[in-house]
Image: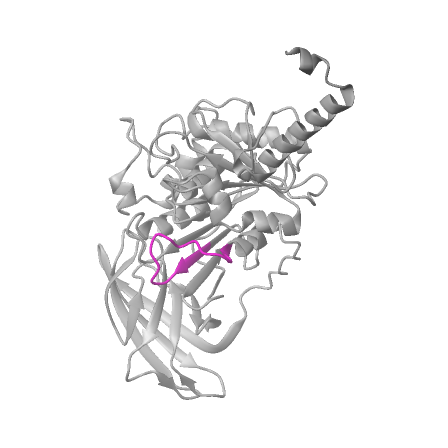
Amino acid sequence: MTASARRRPRPAILALLAALVSLLAATVLTAPAASARAHAAGPVPAATLTEVTGFGTNPSNLQMYVYVPANVTARPAVLVAVHYCTGSGPAMYNGTEFARLADRYGFIVVYPSVTRSSKCFDVSSPQALKRGGGSDPVGIKSMIDWTIRTYSADTGRIFATGISSGAMMTNVLLGDYPDVFAAGAAFAGVPFGCFATTDGSEWNSQCAGGTVIHTPQEWGDLVRNAYPGYTGPRPRMQVWHGTQDDTLRYPNFGEEIKQWTNVQGVGQTPAATDSPVSGWTRTRYGATGDRAPVEAISVQGVGHGVYSDGMGARVLRFFGLDGSVPDPDPGPQPGACRVTASTSAWSTGLTASVTLTNTGASAINGWKLGFTLPAGQTITSGWGATYAPVSGAVTATNATYNGTLAPGASVSIGYQANHTGNSAAPGGFTLNGASCSAS
């Protein structure tokens, strides 16, 4: 220090220090929110995406980002939002509306972030597919524990959602930690255990291609074996998939339904089928209301990028995080239509005959008949209508010559299908989105 500096009056030194503090503060405030760091010892800045370090056991070196809204509620719920391959926690924050929804409803969002070169979550290794086995699920569980400790979060309201690799991780988290999560929502994923490998590879081409097929019991056993001896309640599951997904192909959607209905102990015939948005077919299993044990949404004509803005609000409704009162679950309400369906089967195939009757007082001009095929059935050809997709939740659209149904009139259609043992007739009929009675 120079003599002149030593002689500088104390007020001038204080003014200089104040200026430096102001400059540093301005630098922090203008830096990207995701670059801020917080120690595990205390809360993070409100309404700012913040990286947390030292949050707990983290065998695969994940990063933890957290968003705490300014109006965070007492004993808040926690939503874990898991990114896609090549993504990151900040990318998931910027590309989805969950932080904005957190501002509205007061819950906390945790964004895990992969540091390995692929930027994909480990949903393949034996370690990842076992409770406490290691790898990414253990690190994510540590993030949840940190959040619960720091914010006295509600342990009964912990949820997970994800896209692609994150959707696969959502399936894994609910399988590994059924005692932690209340529900999950997976966008364009695969069932728990479908991506399993033993050679260190992160990719399973058979699963991605939709050729890994199991019975519901087999799929359910994979989940149960992740936590042997667990007898408590299982998380509810919501799954989304585009019919034209060419990355994780559409048959995985039906396999997820098989798995989670079995885990929940509910039937695979939908309790309700509707179309809340044009091009969507929503099926609910085990109950008909907003919080059914399993809910599945098939999005017609959409590829792997099935997630879009606005779907997050529907996730929150399924989770019960939007403050809404759940539907009273009255059961499907029939519209002005009646359907009769029967099948004639042989060893690996069947033909189905379906008759739709307009029981209303007005003519129907253009119809779409929705129904759900039993697990393992795939339509190979049809007549009287066009059928898409060919498995799971199907929509039959009228031909040019039979699109008008007068009151009391009927139309008969049919299809041929392969099956893997279940040759039952379809169920869960809807006509232009309204439930039909079946006879």
Image quadrant assignment for residue 28: top right
Whether residue 293 is in magenta: the answer is: no
In the image shown, does 233 or 160 lie closer to the viewer? 160
Q: x, y percentage for residue 237?
A: 49, 47
**Is 209 drawn above or below residue 176 in the view shown?**
below
Q: x, y percentage for residue 235?
A: 53, 42
Q: Is residue 114 visible?
A: yes
Q: Left or right: 74 with respect to 164?
A: right
Whether residue 310 is in magenta: the answer is: yes
The chosen color scheme is one colour
Q: x, y percentage for residue 8?
A: 72, 18
- For the C terminus, the image quarter is bottom left
Q: Kindly identify the residue that appears in the image at 34 percent across and 48 percent down.
A: 252
Q: x, y percentage for residue 400?
A: 28, 82
Magenta-tinted stretch: 296-311
In the image shown, does 50 or 338 lie closer to the viewer? 50
Q: Is residue 439 visible?
A: no
Q: Left or right: 435 with respect to 342?
A: right
**Is 279 drawn above or below residue 47 in the view shown?**
below
The image shows a total of numbered marks equal to 0
